[in-house]
Image (cartoon, coloured by chain):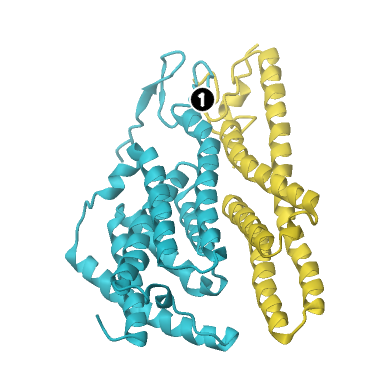
Amino acid sequence: MEKQEIQQIECSHCDGLISINNKYCSICGKEQKKDQTLIDSRKWPGLKQIGLFFGIELICCIAVLSTDNFDISKAILFDIILAGTAMLFFSYNWKENMHLLKWPNFSLKKTIVCIIISIAASILVQFLVEHLNQLLFNTDYSFYSIYKPHKYGKYIMIISVALFPALFEELAYRGYLMQKLLTIVDKKEAIYITSILFFFMHLSMISFFWMLPFSIVLAHIRIRENTLWYGIIIHFTFNLTACMMEILAFDVPI
Amino acid sequence: MPYMEYHTNSCPCCNNKPEPSDLFCNGCGFPLQGTQQEQDFFYSERNAKEIDLADLNNNVESARKSLYWIAGLSVISFLIGYFTAKDEHDKFAILFTSVILIGAFLVFGIWSKTKPTVALISGLSLYVIIHILNAIVDPNTIFSGVILKVIIIVYLIKGIRSVLEVDKLKKELNIN
C-alpha cells in the first residue's frame, strides 16, 4: 500500500518542519494558531455586529406593527429603510459577501423547478393561512387593503411585497447574516440561526409552521449553490403568487 | 532527565499519539522530553486553563437554566393573565400565545444541550422581542420585574460569549 504523504509546513516560531495537522510544534512546543487566533478574535465582534443588525431590523418591523393607520406611503418608507439596512450591512462586509452575487452554476432546469415549487407552495400556504386565521381568530387578513386605494396600488404592492423583500431579505439574511455566522458557527448552526431570526423578524407566530421550513430550505439552497439568486427567485415567486391571489380574490385581474 | 516512557504510549495530557522523535506533543504542546520542572509548569498552566474552562461551562449552564426560568415565568404570567382576562376571546389569545412561547423556550432549553449557540441566540432574541412588544402594548410592563429581566438577559449574553470561548479553549487543550 502506498504510504500517505502528510503535507509539511514550517513552524511559525522555530521554522522546523512539522505536519500541517499539528496543533502544536513537535520541536519547539509553540501553538500553531495559523489564522485561528484571528478567526477566534473576530467571533465576538461579529456576533455583536449581528446583534446591531437584528436590532435595527427588529425596530423597523415592530414599528410597522405598532404604527396606527398603516398606509401605502408608510409601507414604502419601511421598505426603503429595510432595504437600506440590508445594503449597508451587506456592503460593509463586501469582501466576504460579493461572491454571493455571482451565479456560478446557472441551471435553467433548477430555476424552473424552483419557480414551479414555490408557486405551488405559496398557493398551499395561502390556503392554509386563510383557513387557520378563520379558525383561530375568526378574521380575514388582507394586505391588499393597504395598497388598494392607490391608483397604481397593485403595482406598488408587487414591488413592496414581492420584489423588495425577495431582494433585500435575501441580501440581509441569506447574504450578510449567513456569511457572518459562517465565520462564527458551523454550517448547520448558521442555517438554524438565520432561519429562526428570519422567522422572528416577521413577528407572526401563526406563520411558524410554514415560515421556518421555508427559510430553512432557502438557507440550505444558499449553502449548497453558494449563490443568492435561487433564493431571490424562490422568495419573489412565492410572494408574487401571494400578491396575485390577493388581487384575484379582491379585485379584477391586472 | 527526559521522560522517555511517554514516547511508547500516548501523551499524558491529551491522549494524542506522538512520534517517538517528537520533543513536544503536537496535539497539546506537552513537553514530552522536557525536565520534570518543565512538565510541572505545563501541568500548572493547563490546570489554570481547565479552571477557566469549568467557569465558562458554568456560564453556559446558567444561560441554559435561564431558558427554563423564562419558561417557568411565562407559565406564571400565563396563569395570572388567563384568570384575570375579561372575555373568552382574550382568554383564547393568552392561551394560544402562552402555549407557543412556553413551548418555544422549553424547546430552546432542551436544544441548548446539543446546539447551545443556536438555542441561546434564539432564546435571547425571542425574550427581547416579547418584552419590546409587551412594552409597546403596555408601557408599564417595562418596569415590572426589570431586575429579573436584566439578569436573565445578562446570563444569556454571557452564555453565548462563553460558548465561543469554550470552543476556543477546548481547541487549545485538545479536548472534545
Residue shown at 52% from the left, 23% from the top: A31
Residue B110 against residue B166 in the figure, above or below: below
Residue B76 against residue A226 in the figure, above or below: below
Q: Nearer the viewer, residue B90 or A136?
A: B90
Left or right placement of residue A242 versus residue B167 in this view: left
* Number of numbered discs visible in the structure rendering: 1
Q: Residues within 10 Å of mark 1 (few under 14, many from 20)?
A: many
Q: The C terminus of chain A is located in which quarter?
A: bottom left
Say which residue label 1 marks: A24
Q: Amino acid at mark 1?
A: Tyr
Q: Quadrant of residue A183?
A: top left
Residue shown at 66% from the left, 21% from the top: B42
Residue A86 % position (x, y): 40, 49
Left or right placement of residue B173 versus residue A132 in this view: right
Residue A205 against residue B4 in the figure, above or below: below
Residue shown at 54% from the left, 64% from the top: A67
Q: Secondary structure at mark 1?
A: loop
Q: Which chain is cyan?
A: A
Question: What colour do you see for chain B?
Answer: yellow
Left or right placement of residue B74 versus residue A73 in this view: right
Q: Nearer the viewer, residue B124 or A40?
A: B124
**Chain that bears disc 1:** A
Q: Is residue A166 visible?
A: yes
* Extreme-top residue of the structure: B1
